[in-house]
C-alpha cells in the first residue's frame, strides 16, 4: 500500500512540474500609453458666467489631476492683491478667492501647462476660465506675437501687459490691469477685455513683481496705443455668457484678427564697474569690466614698469607682457572717465614652475601652441595662429611634403619671417596643388612667444580642394525706401558671420568661392549708421533696430551659380 502511494505521489509531482514548465507567464500590457491631457467634465459656475457673487470655483475633469507651480503658471487678469488658494480634490480643482472682487468686472484665469493628469503628467497647454461680477462678460481682445529683437525668433513664456491709461511710466511703477503669457510660437491673446485703446508691453519679469525694475529684464513696447477688437464668434462661444450679444459680421476665427508684433530687447547697461583682474597664464592679464569700454587710461604707480602689448575688446582690456613679471606692478586703471581702480598685477604662480623658465613637454607643461586656419582651402591662404604674441624672426623653415598618386612624395622648403613686433597670426602665401595631399612640418623651437614659451614640432596634414568644391551666390536685395542703410550678413550653417556688407540702396551682392553647404542671410536696419545692431531704450522711446532674416536656407552646390531675390517689407 505504501509503494502504491509513493508511486501516486511521484506521478502527481511530475505532472505539476510538466504543467509548470509549459505554462507561459505574460504580464498584462495595459493598452497604449496615455498621452492625452485631462478633459473638462464640469465647471461650476459655468465658464463665461455673469453676476458672479461667490468665493469659490470648482472645475472637474475626467481623471485625477495635479497642479504644477501655480505661482508662475496661473495668471489672473486683472491681477489680485491676494492670490487665490488652489486645491485639488481627486478629479476637481477648487479655486477659493482671498480678495474682494471688483464690481462689474470681467476676470480671466489662465492656466499655462499647469493642470496635468496625475499618472502621466500630460498637461493642458492652456486653459482659460472667464467670469464677470457684472451683467455681461467683456467680449473684446488683443492678440499678437512677441519677437526677440536680436535673433528675430519667437519668445516663449513672456508676460504681456495691457493698461487702459496712456502713461509712459506705467510699466515702471504700476502693475498691469490685464495680463497673459506667450506660447512657444511667441503668440499671445488677452481676452475678455472692455472695448477701447490700450497701452501694450511685454516683459521678461525676473523677480515676478509685474514691474519693469531690473536692468537685466527684457521689455517690448508699442509706440502708440492699440485698439481692442471684438472676439471672434468661436472664441465668444467658449468664454462668454449667452447674454452677451454677438454682433453680425464678426470674424469666425481668431486667425482673421489683426496681429500686433512687439520686439523684446534688453537695454544696454551703461553703468560701468570693474569686475575682476584675470591672470590664467604667464604674462597675460585681463581687466574685465561690467559694460562697454569707450575709453581708458592706465597709470603705473610702482617703481618698475613692464612693457606690454594691449588689446581692447568690448568689455575687456588685455595686456600681453613682453617679459614675465618678476615683481608686483601696481596700475591705476580709469575707464570711461568715471571708474578708477588701483590694481595689483602679481607674477604668475603655478606649482613647480619658476617664472621665466622655458616650458615644454620635458617639464610637463604645454608648449606654445600653433593653430591653423583655412588648411586645404583653394582660395584662402593658410594662416598660422598663436595664443600669445611671438617675437620677430626671419628664419622659420617650413617643410612641405606633397604626396602624388603615381610619382610619390615631393619635398620642398620655404622660409617664413615674422617682421611685426606684435603679431598673433602669420600668413603662408603659397597656392597648393588641387586635390593633392600635403603635409607641412614646422620644426621644434622656431617660434618664441613673449611669455617665454616656444613650440614643439607641428605637423599639419590636408588635401587641397578643387574648383568643383565651390559655388557662387548672386543676391538681389530690394530694400525699403526709408533712408536707412542696411547691414547685410552672410552666415554659415552654424550661424558664424562670413561676410558683412553695407547697402545704402537696393542692389546686388555676389558671393564668390562659397564651399558647398547651407547658408543664411541676415539684414539689420542700421538707423544710426554705426554698422552694428543696437538695442532699444524704453525711457528714451527708442525701439531696437529691426533684424530681417531671409525666409529660407540657401543651399550652395559645387560648380553651380545660384541667383536669389530678397524684397524686405518695411
Image (tube, rainbow, N blue to C red):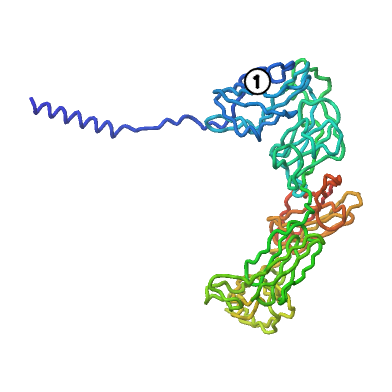
User: In the rendered image of this protein, does residue 124 appear above or below residue 294?
Assistant: above
Instruction: Using the rendered view, name the quadrant where residue 68 is placed.
Output: top right
User: In the rendered image of this protein, does residue 300 appear above or below residue 47?
Assistant: below
The residue drawn where x is 40% and y is 32% is 27
- Direction bottom: furthest residue: 395
Which of the image's four quarters has the C terminus? top right
Q: Nearer the viewer, residue 11 or 90?
A: 90
Question: Does residue 286 appear in this view?
Answer: yes
Q: Nearer the viewer, residue 539 or 160?
A: 539
The residue drawn where x is 66% and y is 34% is 73
Q: Nearer the viewer, residue 321 or 364?
A: 321
The residue drawn where x is 72% and y is 26% is 108
User: In the rendered image of this protein, does residue 483 appear above or below residue 81?
Assistant: below
User: Which residue lies under the disc numbered 1?
Assistant: 57
Residue 255: give x, y in percent of width and height: 77, 32
User: In the rendered image of this protein, does residue 548 appear above or below residue 338?
Assistant: above
Instruction: Using the rendered view, name the quadrant where residue 87 is placed.
Output: top right
Which of the image's four quarters has the N terminus? top left
Q: Nearer the viewer, residue 546 or 349?
A: 349
Element at label 1 = strand
Q: Is residue 127 left or right of residue 543?
A: left
Instruction: Count numbered badges in the picture.
Output: 1
Residue 434: give x, y in percent of width and height: 67, 71
Q: Is residue 37 left or right of residue 297?
A: left
The residue drawn where x is 68% and y is 28% is 83
Question: Does residue 429 appear in this view?
Answer: no
Amino acid at each position: 500500500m505504501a509503494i502504491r502511494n509513493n508511486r501516486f505521489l511521484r506521478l502527481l509531482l511530475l505532472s505539476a512540474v510538466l504543467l509548470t514548465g509549459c505554462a507561459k507567464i505574460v504580464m498584462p500590457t495595459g493598452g497604449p500609453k496615455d498621452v492625452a491631457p485631462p478633459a473638462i467634465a464640469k465647471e461650476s459656475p459655468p465658464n463665461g458666467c455673469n453676476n458672479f457673487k461667490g468665493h469659490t470655483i470648482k472645475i472637474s475633469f475626467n481623471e485625477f489631476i495635479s497642479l504644477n507651480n501655480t505661482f508662475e503658471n496661473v495668471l489672473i487678469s486683472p491681477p489680485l492683491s491676494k492670490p487665490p488658494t488652489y486645491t485639488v480634490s481627486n478629479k476637481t480643482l477648487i479655486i477659493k478667492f482671498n480678495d474682494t472682487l471688483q464690481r462689474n468686472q470681467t476676470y480671466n484665469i489662465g492656466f499655462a501647462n499647469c493642470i496635468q493628469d496625475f499618472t502621466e503628467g500630460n498637461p493642458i497647454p492652456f486653459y482659460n476660465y472667464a467670469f464677470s461680477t457684472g451683467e455681461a462678460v467683456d467680449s473684446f481682445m488683443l492678440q499678437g506675437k512677441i519677437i526677440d529683437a536680436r535673433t528675430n525668433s519667437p519668445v516663449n513664456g513672456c508676460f504681456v501687459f495691457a493698461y487702459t491709461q496712456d502713461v509712459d511710466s506705467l510699466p515702471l511703477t504700476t502693475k498691469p490691469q490685464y495680463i497673459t503669457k506667450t506660447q512657444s510660437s511667441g503668440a499671445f491673446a488677452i481676452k475678455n477685455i472692455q472695448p477701447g485703446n490700450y497701452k501694450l508691453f511685454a516683459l521678461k519679469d525676473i523677480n515676478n513683481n509685474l514691474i519693469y525694475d531690473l536692468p537685466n529684464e527684457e521689455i517690448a513696447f508699442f509706440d502708440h496705443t492699440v485698439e481692442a477688437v471684438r472676439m471672434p464668434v468661436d472664441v465668444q462661444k467658449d468664454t462668454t455668457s449667452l447674454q452677451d450679444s454677438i454682433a453680425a459680421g464678426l470674424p469666425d476665427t481668431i486667425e482673421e484678427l489683426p496681429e500686433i508684433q512687439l520686439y523684446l530687447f534688453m537695454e544696454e547697461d551703461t553703468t560701468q564697474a570693474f569686475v575682476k583682474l584675470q591672470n590664467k597664464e604667464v604674462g597675460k592679464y585681463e581687466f574685465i569690466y561690467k559694460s562697454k569700454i569707450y575709453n581708458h587710461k592706465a597709470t603705473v604707480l610702482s617703481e618698475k614698469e613692464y612693457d606690454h602689448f594691449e588689446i581692447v575688446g568690448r568689455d575687456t582690456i588685455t595686456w600681453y607682457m613682453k617679459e614675465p613679471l618678476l615683481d608686483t606692478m601696481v596700475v591705476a586703471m580709469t575707464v570711461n572717465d568715471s571708474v578708477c581702480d588701483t590694481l595689483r598685477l602679481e607674477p604668475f604662480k603655478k606649482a613647480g614652475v619658476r617664472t621665466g623658465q622655458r616650458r615644454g613637454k620635458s617639464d610637463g607643461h604645454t608648449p606654445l601652441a600653433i593653430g591653423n586656419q583655412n588648411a586645404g582651402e583653394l582660395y584662402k591662404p593658410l594662416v598660422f595662429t598663436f595664443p600669445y604674441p611671438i617675437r620677430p624672426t626671419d628664419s622659420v623653415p617650413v617643410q612641405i611634403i606633397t604626396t602624388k598618386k603615381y610619382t610619390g612624395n615631393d619635398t620642398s622648403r620655404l622660409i617664413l619671417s615674422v617682421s611685426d613686433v606684435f603679431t598673433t597670426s602669420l600668413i603662408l602665401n603659397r597656392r597648393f596643388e588641387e586635390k593633392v595631399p600635403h603635409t607641412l612640418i614646422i620644426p621644434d623651437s622656431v617660434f618664441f612667444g613673449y611669455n617665454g614659451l616656444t613650440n614643439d614640432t607641428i605637423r599639419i596634414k590636408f588635401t587641397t580642394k578643387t574648383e568643383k568644391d565651390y559655388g557662387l551666390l548672386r543676391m538681389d536685395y530690394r530694400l525699403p525706401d526709408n533712408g536707412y542703410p542696411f547691414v547685410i550678413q552672410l552666415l554659415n550653417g552654424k550661424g558664424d558671420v562670413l561676410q558683412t556688407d553695407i547697402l545704402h540702396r537696393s542692389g546686388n551682392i555676389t558671393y564668390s568661392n562659397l564651399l558647398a553647404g547651407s547658408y543664411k542671410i541676415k539684414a539689420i536696419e542700421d538707423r544710426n549708421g554705426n554698422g552694428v545692431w543696437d538695442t532699444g531704450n524704453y525711457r528714451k522711446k527708442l525701439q531696437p533696430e529691426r533684424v530681417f532674416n531671409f525666409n529660407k536656407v540657401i543651399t550652395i552646390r559645387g560648380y553651380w551659380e545660384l541667383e536669389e531675390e530678397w524684397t524686405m517689407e518695411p
